[in-house]
Image (cartoon, rainbow, N blue to C red):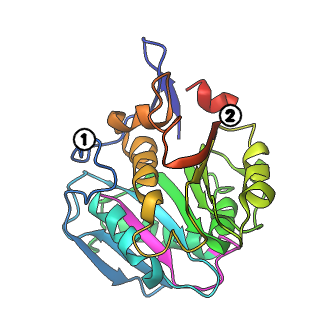
């Protein structure tokens, strides 16, 4: 994901091929698209707008489940992202830490995008790809983010898999204040601290446990949606949620801890 600098000096995401409908600042609310889901036949559940083309080409989010979990555990969150115009490829595996199954979802969508007669033909923006996942899937997200095709990552309460130094693009890494499985101070903040080579933000959701990201994503849902809408859709309404002097999340009571590294503060 290239970043360009406008004449105002503000760094902005490179323009997308076409704009998805605006949702104002209602990141946690449903997006404008009716959603459907299907099996890829290649090991993934695909959540997508029922009628593709409303964003021109739709950006991709790759998803990794927590240990022993399946996409159905997170279906409301994944459908939420699809309602905002993303094509979500969720790996049908309970062991997603390698990131390889997540990346296989991108391989599948890339092939379908080029296949005449496919519902995805010409509708997938393979140049705008994000990765996210929970627990072991958060570790898998870091592994997937080492692939140059992945523009940005959102590891949620991530396991130990993956090497932060291999990430290629901006990261929004998330912890839960009351998570006793992936303890933020021991297992999440050190990974944020290791990301000095990329723009990185750490958010610790107040009151969150290790199970908060399941279902509809709880308080994580809105901020993650805003992050992906900015970096993958060039939604300028989301810029101020994370960047600039009026950063909306900075100091917000939804976070028990919120940090931006030097590269993020410079955007």
- Identify the residue at image location x=25%, y=60%: 30
- Report the disc number at residue 250: none
Secondary structure found at label 1: loop
- Identify the residue at image location x=31%, y=69%: 48
Q: Does the magenta stretch include residue 87?
A: yes
The answer to whether one can see residue 142 in this image is yes
Q: How crowded is mark 1: few (under 14 residues within 10 Å), some or many (20 or more)?
A: few
Which x, y percent locates residue 100? 65, 73
**How many badges with numbers are in the image?**
2
Q: Residue furthest top?
A: 7
Q: Is residue 193 magenta?
A: no
Which x, y percent locates residue 119? 26, 72
Which residue position is annotated with label 2? Answer: 261
Is residue 182 found left or right of 172 in the rendered image?
Answer: right
Question: Which region is colored magenta?
Answer: 85-100
Badge 2 or badge 1: first in the primary sequence: 1
Which x, y percent locates residue 31? 24, 57
Secondary structure found at label 2: loop
By secondary structure, the bulk of the magenta-drawn segment is best described as loop
The image quadrant of residue 209 is bottom right
The answer to whether one can see residue 150 in this image is no
The image quadrant of residue 133 is bottom right
Circles 2, 1 touching at the beta carbon (< 8 Å):
no
Which residue position is annotated with label 1? Answer: 24
């Amino acid at each position: 994901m290239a970043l360009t600098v406008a004449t105002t000096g503000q760094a902005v995401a490179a323009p997308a091929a076409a704009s998805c409908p605006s949702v104002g600042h209602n990141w946690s609310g449903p997006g404008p698209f009716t959603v459907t889901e299907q099996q890829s036949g290649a090991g993934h559940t695909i959540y997508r707008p029922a009628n593709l083309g409303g964003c021109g080409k739709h950006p991709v989010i790759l998803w990794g489940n927590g240990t022993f979990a399946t996409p159905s555990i997170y279906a409301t969150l994944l459908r939420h992202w699809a309602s905002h115009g993303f094509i979500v490829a969720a790996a049908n595996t309970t062991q997603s830490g390698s990131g390889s199954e997540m990346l296989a979802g991108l391989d599948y969508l890339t092939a379908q995008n080029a296949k005449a007669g496919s519902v995805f033909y010409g509708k997938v923006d393979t140049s705008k790809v994000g990765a996210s996942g929970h627990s072991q899937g958060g570790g898998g997200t870091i592994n997937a983010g080492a692939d140059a095709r992945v523009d940005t990552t959102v590891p949620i309460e991530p396991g130990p898999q993956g090497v932060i130094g291999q990430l290629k693009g901006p990261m929004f890494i998330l912890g839960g204040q009351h998570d006793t499985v992936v303890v933020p101070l021991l297992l999440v903040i050190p990974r944020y601290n290791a990301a000095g080579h990329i723009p990185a933000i750490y958010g610790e959701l107040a009151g969150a446990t290790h199970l908060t990201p399941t279902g509809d994503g709880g308080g994580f849902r809105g901020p993650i949606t805003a992050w992906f809408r900015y970096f993958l859709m060039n939604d300028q309404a989301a810029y101020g949620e994370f960047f600039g002097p009026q950063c909306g999340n900075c100091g917000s009571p939804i976070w028990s801890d919120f940090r931006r590294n030097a590269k993020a503060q410079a955007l």
